[in-house]
Amino acid sequence: MDLGLKDKVVVITGGSQGIGKAAAKEFAREGAHVCVCARRQERLDEARAEFAAEGFDLMTMQVDVTKYDQLEALADAAVEKFGRIDVWINNAGVNQYKFLIDYEPDDLRRIIETDLIAVITGSQIAAKRMKETGGGVIISASSFAAITPHAGKAPYAACKSGVLSLTKAMAAEFAPYNIRAVAYIPGMIKTEISRDNIALNGEKLLADIPMRRFGEPEDLAKGIVFLASDVAAGYINGVALEISGGKRCVQNPWYPYDQLKAKEN
């Protein structure tokens, strides 16, 4: 299926590694113009070189998403180069394990500003530009922590719950301008951030996943590209897509495996 993404302009925050980079590649393969931002210039340089080796151009910009003026400069640079923004993906995020009682004010500020406020401001900035050019799609990263919070990550969970609520509100408010707002909820995806957790708790984590495998960034990327396509997902609005291998779709995802094993024995 032609997803209708050729020559679309896609901006991805936190796009120099992991899920963001995989999504950027998938959009590039669909013929889109892609712009990514990140805080570390060396990561951006590495991503640009990797894309060039595969024959893709990648626009990059060093941005701290907690700074409104830097996010606005990112949007302006994309519009100046490509003439518009069709898809804006709020992918950048931070996380931290710590009991709530132990969080310092600076810890809280960093998480809330990155995981919620930057999603709000980035969406504002994108919507203003999309409104001028006939519409677009705003896609935001949520988390399973928004559905079932983790002990030790309370502020993160609160922010990701906020992203789900924000997505619904944006879907209604932006609909008159032909702007869709959707979110995605990743399962346990093998990225730089999750590597240590998977190494320490792999079997325990797999027990929650009926498909009994961890996701690859490419699994997320294909779902994100689907959501961005007006051809394939044009009537999907105000909801979050779980891309998780069925994580926690039932209370006991290990049960069918145990039953099969018992029969075999």
Image (cartoon, rainbow, N blue to C red):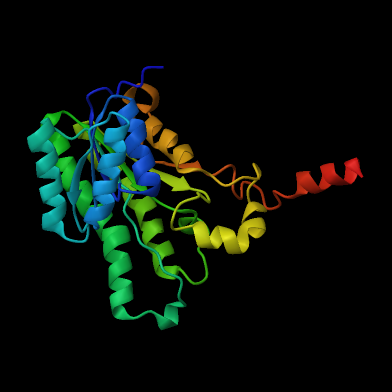
Relative placement, left or right, of 207 versus 199 is right
- For image coordinates 33% across by 74% down, the residue present is 107
Residue 160's quadrant in the figure?
bottom left
Q: Residue at x 23, y 37 (%)?
A: 58
Q: Quadrant of the N terminus?
A: top left
Residue 172 showing in the rendered view: no
Q: Is residue 190 left or right of residue 19?
A: right
Horizontal and vertical percent position of residue 125: 16, 47
**Left or right side of 21 for 145:** right
What is the residue that sits farthest to the left in this orientation?
80
Which x, y percent locates residue 135?
20, 31
Seen from the viewer's position, the closer of residues 223 and 37 is 37
Q: Please state which of residues 114 and 174 is positioned toward the viewer in this rendering.
A: 114
Residue 248 percent coordinates (x, y): 61, 50
Depicted 230 relative to depicted 50: above or below: above
Residue at the extreme top: 1
In the image, taking residue 71 as reference, residue 142 lies left or right, namely right
Report if residue 213 is visible in the image. yes
Residue 222 location (% of width, % of height): 43, 33
In which quadrant will I find the C terminus?
top right
Total count of labels: 0
